[in-house]
Amino acid sequence: MRPDLLNPLFAEASGLKGVGPGLARPLEKLGLKRIRDFIYHLPDRFVHRRAIADLDEGSIGEQVVIALTPVEYRGGPSPKAPFRVLAEDAKGNLCTLAYFGRNAGWAKKQLPLGEKRWVAGRLDQFGQNLQIVHPDHVNPEGAAMLGQLAEAIYPLSEGLTQGRMAALVQQALTHAPDLPEWCEQGVVDRMGWPVWREALTQAHRDEHKEARDRLAYDELLANSLALMLVRASNRRTQGQALRGDGRLRGALKLPFALTGAQARAIAEIEGDLAQAAPMLRLLQGDVGSGKTVVALESLLIAVEAGAQGALLAPTEILARQHFETLRRMAAPTGVNIALYTGRDKGRARESILMGLMDGSIDIVIGTHAIFQDAVVYRNLGLVVIDEQHRFGVGQRLMLTQKGKGTHCLAMTATPIPRTLTLAQYGEMDVSRLDELPPGRQAIDTRVVAQERLGDVVEALARHFSTGQQAYWVCPMVRESEVADLAAAEERHEMLSLRFGEDAVLVHGQMKPEQKDAAMERFASGQAKLLVATTVIEVGVDVPNATLMVIEQAERFGLAQLHQLRGRVGRGSEKSTCLLLRGETLSEVSRERLALMRETQDGFRLAEEDLRLRGGGELLGTRQSGDTPFRVASLDQITRLLPMAHDDARLLIERDGGLTGERGAAARVLLYLFERDWGVQLLRGG
């Protein structure tokens, strides 16, 4: 149960004065539904103003606060011209206050002639005259204006103004209670951090680095602590030790030798499975590094030991692909592998359910349908989760509860910098596949200017004439799904004029069955070109697709470009990736594209992406909203996470977990950041 102390923070936003049905939508877009969300809606930046006694003290381009007296109104010669108010300072110097597109009545009401007003805004020069365009604030009280010397600028959505947002945040802050200190006192003293409530107030008032760091640290500590509780609970769980005898793995006839990295990962997994405490391991494999073979070997160990294995894929098309691949590879072993998705109905469904219950099915591959209540296993020993980032910790826990202390191997094709691995998967041991299998060819990567689009289309035609296929990925447009969609539809239309039925379109707004049908046409070779937004399924394997075109490549982060490039180069033919770039490139974009040409090492690219601050793409997803953090920035994660991780370990190992005074405060912290599954586990354990 959430501590009563926190109830004021989890009250609905509708309790704030001024929040009615009209504001509900814009607030919801920003994720502001409860008081807690407002207090953690931190400013992007601050506008710093200087109070000046007269215009002679000010500099052009400076943000100022000054007392001015309006002396004359001047309407423009045409309705489109600005309305101007001529005003003078204490020395009689003149300044124009200009209002564009605003009604004159409003300006006159704010600035009555002959009455002194305090004005805040940017001092500029127009011809020979000083002017302030659209003053930010106009107030009869000087004291009120001096409170605006450092003004917070908040992230907004349509229908909200800075003034309204600031007022709501200030209101929300009055609901913040005094909370007990959960940070190690030594850390607080060393870093010079204020207490929690004071840190919140300061973070909204000015650029207080210590306050911002303190709030970010709290979030990182909550996350580390919850993940460690998962780990500790896992270690206390009595699972079953799975020791294989090698007979099934020995029967495998792999067409290639394992890489050193694969052999190492399999040995680590085998060691984990032999323990009674359930395995919690993350397998990080670069694009094409051979995770599937590692997964198969792991599942065979479980079957050799008399248990069943399950492989969970995020989408049906990926589940089918894994099924075909594993069934083909495991054919010599004679193990019974089944595919189960939400689409299975009637007799087929019954037969699979019976096979899982009586143990005649050794390995099942499917979507989350394999964990529905109706699915009962005779002895589920190992769960392999593909594309781990699609499933949260809570879901991971639910999946492993299908068996008695089931072992869990999570896989991701997204190389993640070490710091962020700790942030997202701190409860897991990590194996890395950082070598490419022999025979896997490097992908020829080239940067091409967008104006050569016509040449690229002709190159596509030549490419298709040799019987090969291609992908065409459309740009990310202003982080907007709708605009992304329009860009993809427009490009598909253009390419369809040239290639007709051979070009199919896939985007995130399609119904799953439409998307699957289009992907199916491409995967089976009926369509030659797949035009898509960035939703191209991770892992979809079409060996005959050997050309990847990424439009406006400079808009993407390195990790995402690397993921997309990895869709090709899966067969024996030479593969090419064309990065189409726009006309104007920033320094960072230029460096990113150069790195893409230079290296195919996903782990190096992930670290470089972190250095170049590539935002959300770091986690292989397009929005930073997919990092588990809302308060901590990438810079703060890098600086503070190792410290938070150590502090969480101390709390669990030295301070007896969540008992005692600091432990009770840490419980409050877990509930505050909604990592309460950590507490549930503690109770359950």
Image (cartoon, grey):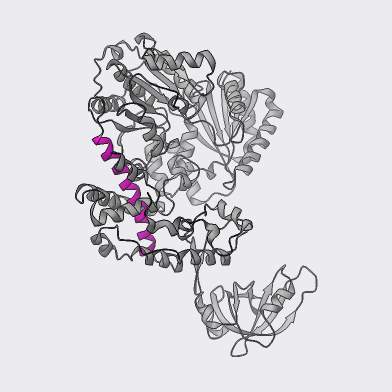
Q: Name the residue located 25 percent from the left edge and 63 percent from the top edge.
A: 190
Residue 562: % across, % down: 46, 36
Residue 294: % across, % down: 34, 24
Residue 221 shown in magenta = yes
**What secondary structure is the stretch in magenta mostly built from?**
helix
Residue 568 as seen in the image, left or right of residue 645: right
Which residue is outermost to the left? Answer: 654
376 above or below 429? above
Q: How many marks?
A: 0
Q: Name the residue located 77 percent from the left edge and 67 percent from the top edge.
A: 80
Q: Is residue 597 visible?
A: yes
Residue 116: % across, % down: 62, 86
Specify start and end residues of the magenta stretch as a single range: 210-236
Which residue is outermost to the bottom? Answer: 91
Residue 402 as seen in the image, left or right of residue 239: right
Q: Is residue 572 visible?
A: no
